[in-house]
Image: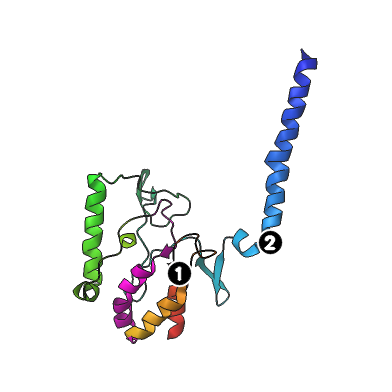
Amino acid sequence: MIRHIRPALVLFALLSILTGLAYPLGLTAVANLVFSHQAQGSIIIRDGHPVGSALIGQNFTSDRYFHPRPSATSGVDPADPSKSVPTPYNAAVSVGSNLGPTSRSLVARVSAGAVAIGADNPDAIREGWKIPADLVTTSASGLDPDISPEAAFFQVRRVALARHLPEMRVHDLVVQMIRQPMMGWLGEPHVNVLALNLALDAVQ
């Protein structure tokens, strides 16, 4: 029996070493060599200090900054470890809301979000802007760092007023920060919120 089992055990050990150790280490080494910035988390450095990742959104709430799309991630409640509380952009718990289009909870949340965004951006509403869908809906990961150009333009008036900047100056900055689809067709035009807000801080 040992004679029959030994080849299976040897093959199991060999494949475990190849696929569980050698392949991941080799792939990591190549990634660090060819795509070092991405492999290290696409960390953005400002004045010698890390301020975030280009791949993970942040919960900007001040009128002086462009706001990201909502996040459905949660974390442990500090007051009661048996419960969870909303913690937007919690990279340790990447998750979507998992609510379908017929969900009453989803409709209620989107409706409340639209009311809040309208209150934060009254000038855009008065000018006839429709609230972009990505400003009231969460992404599948809950960590999306990007918004659509429409979502950024929708917020231009609020940010310009809060910073006492010419509206056209902020508008032009958004235009400069728009990233086109990869290879011209893969994905959609988008704006990285953290990069945009950092560029905005550099204006003043």
Residue nearest the viewer, comparing 101 with 180: 180
Where 5 sits versus 70, above or below?
above
Q: Which kind of residue does numbered mark 1 sit on?
A: Leu
Q: Which mark is residue 34?
A: 2
Residue nearest the viewer, comparing 73 with 125: 125
The reply to whether callout 2 and callout 1 are in contact (CB within 8 Å) is no
Q: Residue furthest left?
A: 126
Q: Coloring scheme of the render?
A: rainbow
Residue nearest the viewer, comparing 24 with 177: 177
Secondary element under disc 1, as helix, strand or loop, is helix
Q: From the image, tell me which residue sits under label 1.
A: 194
Q: Is 19 included in the stretch rendered in magenta?
A: no
Quadrant placement of the N terminus: top right
* Residues in magenta, as a range: 139-166
Quadrant placement of the C terminus: bottom left
| Precedes in sequence: disc 2 or disc 1 | 2
Q: Is 142 included in the stretch rendered in magenta?
A: yes
Secondary element under disc 2, as helix, strand or loop, is helix
Mark 2 vs mark 1, foreground winner is: 2
- Residue 174, how many percent across, how many down? 41, 76
Residue occupying image coordinates x 68% and y 40%: 20
Q: Along the horizontal axis of the image, is 147 left or right of 161?
A: right
Q: Which kind of residue does numbered mark 2 sit on?
A: Val
Q: Along the horizontal axis of the image, is 53 left or right of 78?
A: right
- Residue 14, how many percent across, how many down? 75, 33
- Residue 28, how many percent across, how many down? 67, 53
